[in-house]
Amino acid sequence: MTDLTALQEEVKSKLADIQDPQALEALRVSYLGRKGKVTNLFRELGSLSQAERPRFGQALNELKKFVETQIRQKGESFGVKVGQDDSSFDPTLPGVLPRLGRLH
């Protein structure tokens, strides 16, 4: 298993080097995205023994929260919301009905 504290230190050092929001989003995806490092560790959780799972799972959740908060704080320093869509689309609103009839 990967040493989680080493991964946490890696995130800290990479966050210190980031200077723009695009690089911050790329970092978020590389750690928390579908194929990210933290996400892959969650997938490996199933291969652990029953005794190791709770301890490793708790440490992994703490790492994920740490990464999320660090990225969010760095994003706030840039004045952007990282990982959130700022569109005004609301999928809960009813759709637009098509017109009935035809033009003559």
Image (tube, rainbow, N blue to C red):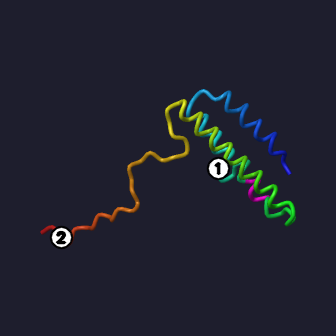
The picture quadrant where one finds residue 31 is: top right
Residue lying at 18% horizontally and 70% vertically, measured from the top left: 102
Q: Which residues are magenta?
A: 40-44
State the residue at coordinates (57%, 29%).
20
Task: From the image, tell me which residue sits under label 2.
Answer: 102
Q: Is residue 60 left or right of residue 71?
A: right
Q: Residue at x 73, y 46 (%)?
A: 63
Instruction: Indicate which disc residue 33 carries.
Output: 1
Position in image of residue 29 (x %, y %): 63, 45
Q: Residue 99 colored magenta?
A: no
In the rendered image, residue 40, in percent from the top left (x then y), is placed at 74, 54
The location of residue 12, given as percent across then percent down, is 72, 34
| Residue 3 in the figure: left or right of residue 79 | right
- Disc 1 marks a residue whose amino acid type is Gly
Residue 97 image offset from top left, x and y in percent = 27, 67
- Magenta span: chief secondary structure: helix
